[in-house]
Amino acid sequence: MTISSTYTLINPQTKALAFKIFCFDNGENFACLQRLNYYSVLVVQKGSGLLKADFSDYPFAGHSLLCFSPYQPFMLEEKEPLAGIALHFHPDFFCIHKHQKEVACNGVLFNNIYRPPLFTLTDAESESLLLVVKQMKAELRSGGLAQYELLVSYLKIFLIMASRIKGQQHPVVQEALAGQKEPFLLQKLKDAIEEHYRSKHTASDYAALLHISPKALAKAARAHFNKTLTNLISERIIIEAKRELYLTSKPVKEIAYNLGFQDEYYFSRFFKTNADVSPQTYRQTVGFARGV
């Protein structure tokens, strides 16, 4: 495998990146904060470091898979020299929302506010994923008939495999939580956020729902999710806002109202604070509905 090799597919309509694979032999590419308008998947093959993403820090070492949605902020602090492969793909190339029934990676690999955006791989799991990447690279080199369709098929296989691997690790996580004091409370919190994030936006709202003090609930959230309760709520709202901006042509004012914001401008400030871009910019650079 050539460490410096890079393979890129450009969208002929937009002239923007559609799909890209590149190999890295250090962490320099990710040492600064990344806010990319496409999905990124990093297959780390060796080395160790600290992932900074979504207001939290996550140590990792050895074979790992790191997955990020468009404009999700992340950066890597390299401890031991990193090496691996990065996959980038724009939602125009493959939309995880539109293909959820086929691939089911949304909420597993991407857009899960309750789990870290990375997980470890065994040697065999890493090799299986890299074998698919090797096929992608060969197709990008050859440029044969129906290249776009074949690359999408390979990407689907890769994401399905990765989702299965991460899904198989979930029972282990649940067993670990079962031995702790507050798994029921945390599940109730997750259920409450999923049910009420459109109408309840503050930590005190959820503390009242769960009949617990805001301080105690905040402490439990930080201990188990490695995030503040306010960040959990904000991230859940932003995920839905991004989905609406991507898939629909609804006016920003309507999206804001549906998410419990009476003031469109307050919602836009909230979105920009949490996504680092305005709703309009997100739709223009990511959204499927931008041309509608």
Image (tube, rainbow, N blue to C red):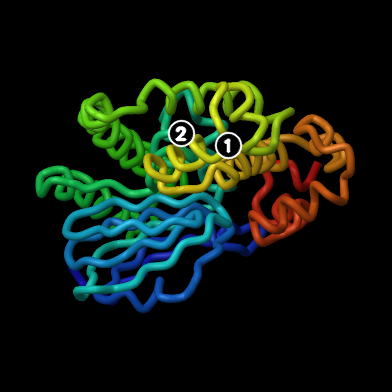
Quarter residue 110 falls in: top left
Quarter residue 152 falls in: top left
The answer to whether residue 19 of the structure is visible from this angle is: no
- Assess disc 2: are there few (<14), some (14-19) or many (≥20) residues with their C-alpha within 10 Å of its C-alpha: some
Q: Going 25% across and 64% down the picture, which residue do you hit?
A: 84
151 over 278 or under it: above or below: above
Q: Residue 224, percent across and down?
A: 37, 40
168 over 70 or under it: above or below: above
The type of residue carrying mark 2 is: Gly
Q: Are marks 1 and 2 in contact (CB under 8 Å)?
A: no
Q: Write down the residue under mark 2.
A: 107
Q: Residue 7, percent across and down?
A: 38, 66
Q: Going 25% across and 60% down the picture, which residue do you hit?
A: 44
- In space, the residues marked 1 and 2 are separated at their CA atoms by 27 Å
Q: Quadrant of the C terminus?
A: top right
Q: Residue 75, percent across and down?
A: 43, 67
The type of residue carrying mark 1 is: Pro
Q: Is residue 40 left or right of residue 1?
A: right
Q: For residue 271, which numbered disc appears in the image? A: none
Q: Going 22% across and 48% down the picture, which residue do you hit?
A: 120
Q: Write down the residue under mark 1.
A: 214
Q: Secondary structure at mark 1?
A: helix
Q: Residue 15, percent across and down?
A: 63, 64
- Assess disc 1: are there few (<14), some (14-19) or many (≥20) residues with their C-alpha within 10 Å of its C-alpha: some
Q: Is residue 56 left or right of residue 85?
A: right
Number of labelled discs?
2
Q: Quadrant of the N terminus?
A: bottom left
Q: Secondary structure at mark 2?
A: loop
Q: Going 46% across and 33% down the picture, which residue do you hit?
A: 107
